[in-house]
C-alpha cells in the first residue's frame, strides 16, 4: 500500500501524522511511504530522518494525495485539501465532523473512506483520542493560569496562591480524560478544584484518585454556583460524533467575576459555552462580557513533539492493520470498524446519520 503523510496546513498546527520510527516499520512490512517535504519540521523531525526510515520525500500535497491509497494526517482536511482527495481514498485523521458540516458534506460527495481517530473505540475507551485528551487537559490549566495574568485581561491572580493569600479556584465541566487531567494538573499546583460530572462512576474514580478534588453533579444550578467563584472554568465535555451540549449560556457569564477565564477544550466539537468561537494559537483569546475566552481547537498542537509522539504510538496498531488489510481491516479490527464514519458517500456512524440525513 502507498501511504501518504502531508504537511498540516491548519493554522499553527505543528504536529505530523507519522513519526520516522513508524515509517520504518511500515517500509519493512513492504509498504511505500510518501512524506511531504518538512511535514515533521514543526515537531522537530527532519526530512533526513524520514529518508533514513525509508520514506520518499515529495514536495507538494498534490503528490501526496495523488499517489497515496491511504493518507495519514492529524487534523481535519482543510478546503484546499478537500479538492485533492480522490474517490475511494482512505483518510485516517481527526475529523470532528459535527463541528464542520461543510467539510463532512464535501467528503460524502468525494466518496472517500474516512476513519476518524476520535471515533476509534475499544470497549469503553477511545485509545487514539485519549493521549491527546490527557495533553489537552494539562494544557487547559496551563493556559488558564497564563491568561489570568493582568496583561491579558485576567484577574491578575496566581492559581497556586502564596502564604497568606487564598488559592485560585478551578471548575472543570466534565470528568472524562480531559477533565480528569485538568483537575489533576490544577490540584497539583495547589488550586481548589471542583469537577462537575453526570456519571457517578467517574465521580467516584476522581475522588479516589484525587482526594483533594471536589465532585458535584453537573446540573444547571451547580454549574451556575461554580461560575460565581471560579477563576478558571475548563469545558471538557465530549459526546463522540455529536455536537457538544451548551452548558453555560451567555447571560450566565454575568455570574462570573470580571477577568475570569474560560478554556473551552470542547470547542472542536462546538464548545460548552454559548459564547465560544474557535480561536488560534496566534490569537488564542478574546474578551466577552469581561470574561477571557480561550477556545483553540488544536490545543495539543502547541507541544507538537510530545503530542506527535503520543498520537503516532496510539494510532500505530490501527494503522498497521489498515496498511496490511485495506478495507478488510474494518471486519478484522473492532476499533477500526467503530472509527469508520464515511465510506463512498455512505454515512456509517449513527450519530452522524442523525445530523446529515
Image (tube, rainbow, N blue to C red):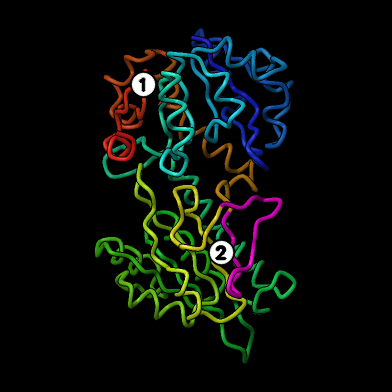
| Residue 298 screen position, x and y as percent | 57, 46
Q: Give above or below for 334 relative to 169.
A: above
Kindly identify the residue that appears in the image at 45 percent across and 19 percent down. 110
Q: Is 237 left or right of 217, judged from the image as shown? A: right
Q: Earlier in the sequence, mark 1 or mark 2?
A: 2
Q: Secondary structure at mark 1?
A: loop
* Displayed quadrant of residue 146: bottom right
| Residue 337 screen position, x and y as percent | 30, 27
Kindly identify the residue that appears in the image at 41 percent across and 73 percent down. 194
Q: What's the mark number on residue 197? A: none
Q: Is 321 left or right of 131, judged from the image as shown? A: left
Quarter of the picture containing the C terminus is: top left
Magenta segment boundaries in residue numbering: 278-295
Q: Give above or below for 159 relative to 59.
A: below
Which residue is denoted by mark 2 in the rendering? Answer: 141
Magenta stretch containing residue 287, yes or no?
yes
Q: Is 7 left or right of 113, judged from the image as shown? A: right
* Displayed quadrant of residue 79: top right
Which residue is denoted by mark 1 in the rendering? Answer: 345
Of residues 15 and 105, which is closer to you in this image? 105
Magenta stretch containing residue 259, yes or no?
no
Of residues 136 and 284, which is closer to you in this image? 284
Mark 1 packing: few (<14 Cα in 10 Å), some, or many (20+)?
Answer: some
Point out the frontmost of discs 1 and 2: 1
| Residue 75 screen position, x and y as percent | 54, 36
Mark 1 vs mark 2, CA separation in Å: 40 Å
Amino acid at each position: 500500500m502507498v501511504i501518504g503523510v502531508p504537511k498540516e496546513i491548519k493554522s499553527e498546527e505543528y504536529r505530523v501524522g507519522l513519526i520516522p520510527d513508524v515509517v520504518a516499520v511500515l517500509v519493512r512490512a513492504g509498504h511505500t511511504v510518501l512524506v511531504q517535504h518538512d511535514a515533521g519540521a514543526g515537531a522537530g523531525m527532519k526530512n533526513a530522518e524520514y529518508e533514513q526510515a525509508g520514506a520518499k520525500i515529495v514536495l507538494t500535497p498534490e503528490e501526496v494525495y495523488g499517489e497515496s491509497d491511504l493518507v495519514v494526517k492529524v487534523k481535519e482536511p482543510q478546503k484546499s485539501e478537500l479538492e485533492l482527495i480522490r474517490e475511494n481514498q482512505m483518510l485516517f485523521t481527526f475529523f470532528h465532523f459535527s463541528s464542520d458540516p461543510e467539510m463532512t458534506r464535501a467528503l460524502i460527495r468525494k466518496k472517500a473512506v474516512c476513519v476518524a481517530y476520535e471515533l476509534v473505540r475499544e470497549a469503553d475507551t477511545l485509545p487514539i483520542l485519549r493521549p491527546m485528551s490527557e495533553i489537552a487537559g494539562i494544557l487547559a490549566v496551563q493556559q488558564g493560569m497564563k491568561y489570568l495574568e493582568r496583561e491579558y485581561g485576567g484577574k491578575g491572580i496566581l492559581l497556586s496562591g502564596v502564604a497568606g493569600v487564598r488559592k485560585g479556584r478551578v471548575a472543570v465541566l466534565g470528568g472524562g480524560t480531559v477533565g480528569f487531567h485538568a483537575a489533576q494538573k490544577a490540584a497539583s499546583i495547589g488550586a481548589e478544584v471542583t469537577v462537575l460530572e453526570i456519571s457517578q462512576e467517574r465521580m467516584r474514580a476522581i475522588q479516589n484518585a484525587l482526594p483533594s478534588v471536589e465532585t458535584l453533579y453537573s446540573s444547571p444550578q451547580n454549574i451556575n454556583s461554580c461560575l460565581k467563584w471560579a477563576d478558571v472554568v475548563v469545558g471538557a465535555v465530549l459526546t463522540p460524533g455529536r455536537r457538544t451540549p451548551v452548558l453555560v449560556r451567555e447571560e450566565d457569564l454575568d455570574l462570573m467575576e470580571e477577568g475570569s477565564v474560560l478554556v473551552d477544550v470542547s470547542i472542536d466539537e462546538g464548545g460548552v459555552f454559548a459564547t465560544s468561537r474557535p480561536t488560534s494559537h496566534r490569537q488564542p483569546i478574546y474578551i466577552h462580557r469581561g470574561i477571557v475566552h480561550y477556545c483553540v481547537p488544536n490545543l495539543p498542537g502547541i507541544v507538537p513533539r510530545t503530542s506527535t509522539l503520543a498520537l503516532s504510538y496510539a494510532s500505530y496498531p490501527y494503522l498497521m492493520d489498515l496498511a496490511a488489510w485495506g478495507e478488510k481491516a474494518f471486519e478484522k479490527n473492532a476499533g477500526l470498524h467503530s472509527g469508520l464514519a464515511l465510506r463512498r458517500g455512505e454515512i456509517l456512524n449513527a450519530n452522524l446519520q442523525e445530523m446529515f440525513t
